[in-house]
Image: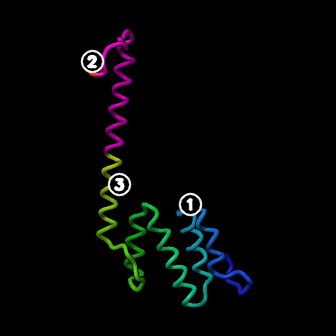
Amino acid sequence: MSVSNSHYTFENQIEVLKFQDPHLVLRILDFSFKNLQTETEKEDLLQYKEKFLFKTFLFDSQRQFLESNQNLSRKINLEEIEKTQENVKKKEDMSKFSIIGFLNLMENYRRNANFDIGSSISKKIV
């Protein structure tokens, strides 16, 4: 992204980023931030960074961003970040237990080669 005064505006340059992975966009925005001269460009870029940062699960980066840019108006606060992080942790734990249960079931199938697949599922689990 160049910041030259060509016929492309800042919004047109950023428009392409909507179709990219948010993690990649954050790296591009961080790189572009170093080349900006005016405060309005920096404010615009910070608003875009906020928009893309909160699409990710980079919770530490989100906290740092909120602490370092307290002047921006935002809808998200630290409590919401904590709640989202807890929800992600719960989903990870549920997925882990489901996978472990499935692997245990498959191990039982492997050990008992003459397993009767015609019986009910409750008998299969026991």
Picture quadrant where residue 88 is located: bottom left
Q: Nearer the viewer, residue 21 or 123?
A: 123
Q: Position of residue 63 (x, y in %)?
A: 37, 71
Residue sticking out furthest to the right: 7
The residue at the point 37 percent across, 18 percent down is 109
**Residue type pointed to by label 3:** Val
Q: Which residue is mark 2?
A: 123
As drawn, is 22 to the left or to the right of 35?
left
Residue at mark 3 to residue at mark 1: CA–CA distance: 19 Å
Per the rendered image, the range of residues in magenta is 94-121
- Of the image marks 3 and 2, the number of the one nearer the N terminus: 3
Q: Nearer the viewer, residue 106 or 51?
A: 51
**Separation of marks 2 and 1 at Cα, in angstroms:** 46 Å
x 32%, y 46%: residue: 93
- The amino acid sitting under disc 2 is Lys
Q: Quadrant of the N terminus?
A: bottom right
